[in-house]
Amino acid sequence: MCVAVSEKEIDALLERWKDSLQSGNPHKVIAHYASKSVLLPFSSMKPLLTLDEKEEYFRHFLKEKPLVRINSHTIELDCNTAINEGFYTYTFQKSGRIVNARYSVVFKWDGLQWLITSDHSSVLPR
């Protein structure tokens, strides 16, 4: 059985994820990820597979106080799966560093809620 979802709802999920980054609390961020998910962030050389690995990553990442702005994106909807991919800019408030990146986030319905099962971002080539 497929759960209906709209592009607007998927946009809202990504906005909530962005808001969780603003909280500075890694627990709030990893609450958006399924227990069996893959995080391939632009600032790590290895895939993060467990919630503990993700929490450790975000504990350090959030110290830089990242702000995220979505520049452009597309959403693809399928049965219990939604893919949000595009381009975003991270501004790190602590250092002033700006990173332009591309991303793809896969959300899946787990029977109760939509969770991230795959999150990949990479720095845009110059």
Image (spheres, rainbow, N blue to C red):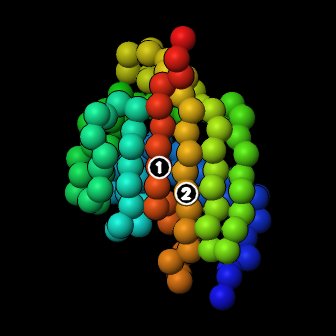
| Residue at the extreme bottom | 1
Dot 2: what SS? strand
Quick check: can you spot residue 109?
yes
* 111 on left or right of 38: right
Dot 1 alpha-carbon crowd within 10 angstroms: few under 14, some 14 to 19, many 20 or more: many
Instruction: Name the amino acid, label 2.
Output: Val
Instruction: Name the amino acid, label 1.
Output: Asp
In depth, the one of 27 and 34 nearer the eye is 34
Q: Is residue 1 above or below residue 66?
A: below
Q: Give the residue drawn at x 47%, y 31%.
A: 122
| Residue at the extreme top | 126
Mark carried by residue 119:
1
Question: Which residue in the structure is indicated by mark 2?
Answer: 106
For the N terminus, which image quadrant? Answer: bottom right
Q: Give the residue drawn at x 60%, y 51%.
A: 14
Q: Is residue 95 above or below residue 114?
A: above
Q: Is residue 9 above or below residue 67?
A: below
Q: Give the residue drawn at x 56%, y 45%.
A: 104
In terms of image quadrants, where is residue 82? Answer: bottom right
In depth, the one of 86 and 59 nearer the eye is 86
The alpha-carbon separation of the residues under discs 1 and 2 comes to: 6 Å
Is there a contact, CB below 8 Å, between mark 1 and mark 2?
yes
Quick check: can you spot residue 12?
no
Across and down, in percent, residue 69 comes to: 62, 32
In terms of image quadrants, where is residue 83? Answer: bottom right
Q: In this view, does 63 lie above or below 55?
A: above
Across and down, in percent, residue 17 comes to: 52, 51
* 50 on left or right of 86: left
In terms of image quadrants, where is residue 34? Answer: bottom left
Dot 1: what SS? strand
Q: Give the residue drawn at x 48%, y 37%.
A: 121
For the C terminus, which image quadrant? Answer: top right
